[in-house]
Amino acid sequence: MSWPDRACAFARALALATLTAGLSALAGVALAGDTAPPSAAQVQRFTHADASLQADGQAEQQEVVALEHRWSQRYPAIGGRASYRIELPPASGTQPMALLFTRIGNQAEVRVNGVMLQRFGTLGDATFDAAKSARVVVVPGAMLRPDGPNLLTVSLTLQAQRGGGLSVVHYGPNDLIDRLADRQALTRDFASIVYAVGLFITGAFTAALWWRQRDPLYGVFALAAFSGVLRNLDRVWPEPPLPWPLWGAVLAVAYACHLALIARFTLLAIGRNPRWLVRALYGSLAAASVLGVVALVWARPLLWTVGLAGLEAVGLACLFLIWQMALRGQRPTAWVMVVAGSLTLLCGTHDLLLVRINLGGAEAAPLMPHAMFVFVLIMAGMVVERYTRSITDYRALNATLSQRVAERERQLGDAFEALRVQQQEQAVAGERQRIMREIHDGVGSQLVGLLNMVTQRDAEPALLEAQVRLALDEMRMAVDSLQPVHGDLGTVLGTLRYRLQPRLQAAGIAVRWDVQQLPPLAHLSPHSVWQVQRILMEALTNVLKHARASEVTVEARWRGGAASAVSLLLSDDGVGLHHGPTDGEAVQGHGLANMRSRAAAIGAELRVEAGAGGGTQVALVLPLTPPSQPSSGA
Amino acid sequence: MPDAAPITVALVEDDASIRDRFARVISSDPTLHFAFGAANATDLFAWFVDNPVDVLLVDLGLPDVPGLEVIRRCRGIQPTCAVMVITMFGDEANMLRAFEAGAGGYLLKDGTERDLAAHVLSLHAGGSPMSPIIARQLLVRWQAGPLPAAAPARRSAAASAPADALSRRESEVLDLIARGFTYPEIAQQLALSVTTVQTHVRNIYGKLDVHSKTEAVYEARQLGLLR
């Protein structure tokens, strides 16, 4: 398995582990809430009370009610007043006793034996909601009658749809009641605070991610989380910033947003965003918001229920879609989403039926906050997986890149090597071609001439020898042209002299040698060396054959400046161009044409003219084609 | 030159026809005495240990031992013997290695028979011919002296033989030879005697002949100069 695959698997496992851990923690909290530990023997539980209930604008009613008593069960759309009376047992000692109200409100006054013990909010003032948390009221032992019943009176004012009412009342020694209250606070307030904080942190985190990446997934989740914070916070916030029905409307809208945006988040996470469903989602959100506001402000609780049901229906559609995706196996997160979505919809249905429509009685508590928090964990898991995946991809990309660079480098190297070999082969082939041509044109033609002479009957030995020497000279010039001269024309001239000096000496021709130091000619190829040699050779041969000279002068000069050039001068003191023997004219003319064409072949200029002191002067001017480099030794 | 005793010459050459030609030419010259002709290095070494000669002619392309090694060993056996390389025309540039191994000159295989005997005599008499191409090679070589490849050689040489570098005069002589001037012309230009020019040329060859120097210098030279 490649390493990216393994990293993905690892990230998934991690996400699942996070989810499982979160779920079991939630289950722990939920279980703790369900199985409240049995009170000590001294703690008594009162599950009924004599109540007088007076809804706004209606007649007062007297009856015995079961605790927990929830006002909205009887009066879903109106507020009112209620008074509960419970007879507490006679007190045996002076130790302080206490009362525990898991829920009391919305505003309340607690009296024992007609003495006011505690007041939660001001009766009739909707700004305060005492029902948000459990309340403990200490009853001083001195107040209690040891011989007769002690009368507990709880007076409430209630606002419509605010979850007001009176819970089961626990009564017992102060310390035991405190302990019980702590335990209940843990299950009730602690979860809300944890959820609120958790949602806030993940909301802030995903908002930051959205800010940097502009990925709607993060944006939607951040909004969902922030809107969820409000509802969880409200459960432990006794004095909200707005008076009741308004605050309730705000809460309803926030809650609707929370639900709808979480549903939207699941679609984004799964990568399926059919337009109809997204529209339905936002439509139901808008509807639920309007219905919620109307329900609370104009006291029409049924409307809010309808709004929630609409959201529930859209949620069900989302779940169906995710389930399809999961079956197709395109997204590994789909099954996690199916589980979380199913859980959420079950909890939502539970809340709708058992809490909202009151089928579950007064004890039923909403499960939705727990379910919603699962999505926080899913989001965390997704972030972990995405981060891991991008790191993995980045590493894989790096590896691929360096591999590709290495591959390219190798290809380049190969291509370069191939090109080099090809060039070398071309150079070798070209050089071979040149040498072949030179052998053919030079030695070859001389040998053919020799053969012609040999086959003539009366061939003179002297002429034969001259012809053989010519052939040998041709061959030696060809070989010399291949010797390294390091671009020095002086060495070329020197070598020529080294070869010919004995012959000139034998012919009784003195040599005046005046070769200056010349700049190195970078473009002095064997071919040009060979051509220069043959031109000079031709000229010297002419001197030997026709000029009847006693001295030959060889000069080499270098002229700097813009038109820098090397000029080679070969002059003799012989009979001159036009005084040669008549049979020699044609040969000489032919030789000159040859010399000219050779000079042209290497871009040089050839001049043959009468010398200053009689005789002939041959001048060969070679341009320094590349920019001249003044010789440092000159 | 017409001394009493003829100059004894030995030859190692694997090509039988060339060997015979050389033998014939040397034998025909009254001032020369052809002592021994070997077809390979092994035969030569076996004979050479016991028979002192004045001149040894060596072909570099022997089948059994590399030519440079033959020169080196023969110089070791008989330091007074002048070793000449038999080479084909146009291989002058490669003669530098032979000089470094201790060769004192070279003969062309395709030279005329008259030249051949004259060259042997000239070499034995202390003559030091030098072609322009060899002079150019030597100039380039010594100019390239401070290059990294030759740096170790330079250092070792400086330690044991400070006079190893070319003198200014020697450089001038080399430059003039490279440009085709004859020894008398050089002597005239530099206001020297022809003998002095000859001496300079011999000294230049001597500086190449590392055989006379310490082994360490020799090795360093090998590294630095034989590329």
Image (cartoon, rainbow, N blue to C red):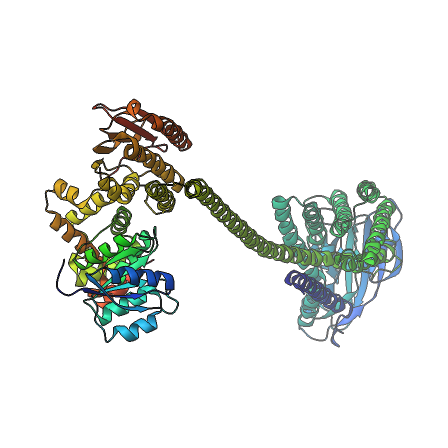
Residue A242 visible? The answer is yes
> Residue A92 is drawn in which quadrant?
bottom right
Residue A89 visible in the picture: no
Position above or below: A448 against A391: above
The image shows residue B211 at horizontal and vertical percentages of 23, 65
Location of residue A224 with respect to A360 vertically, above or below = above
- The percent position of residue A420, horizontal first and vertical second, equals 49, 49
Q: Does residue A418 appear left or right of residue A389 in this picture?
A: left
Q: Nearer the viewer, residue A424 or A309?
A: A424
- Percent across and percent down for residue A469 are 34, 44
Give x and y (percent) for residue A124: 75, 47
Q: Nearer the viewer, residue B204 or A35?
A: B204
Quadrant where the C terminus of chain A is found in the figure:
top left
Question: Where is the N terminus of chain A found, in terms of image quarters?
Answer: bottom right
Q: Residue farthest to the front?
A: A457
> Please, is residue A336 above or below residue A149 in the view?
above
**Front one among B53 and B42:** B53
Residue at 10% across / 45% down in the picture?
B192
Q: How many marks?
A: 0
Q: Nearer the viewer, residue B71 or B152?
A: B71
Residue A486 left/right relative to A555: right
Task: Answer with the quarter of the image where residue B80 lies.
Answer: bottom left
Q: Residue at x 76, y 70 (%)?
A: A36
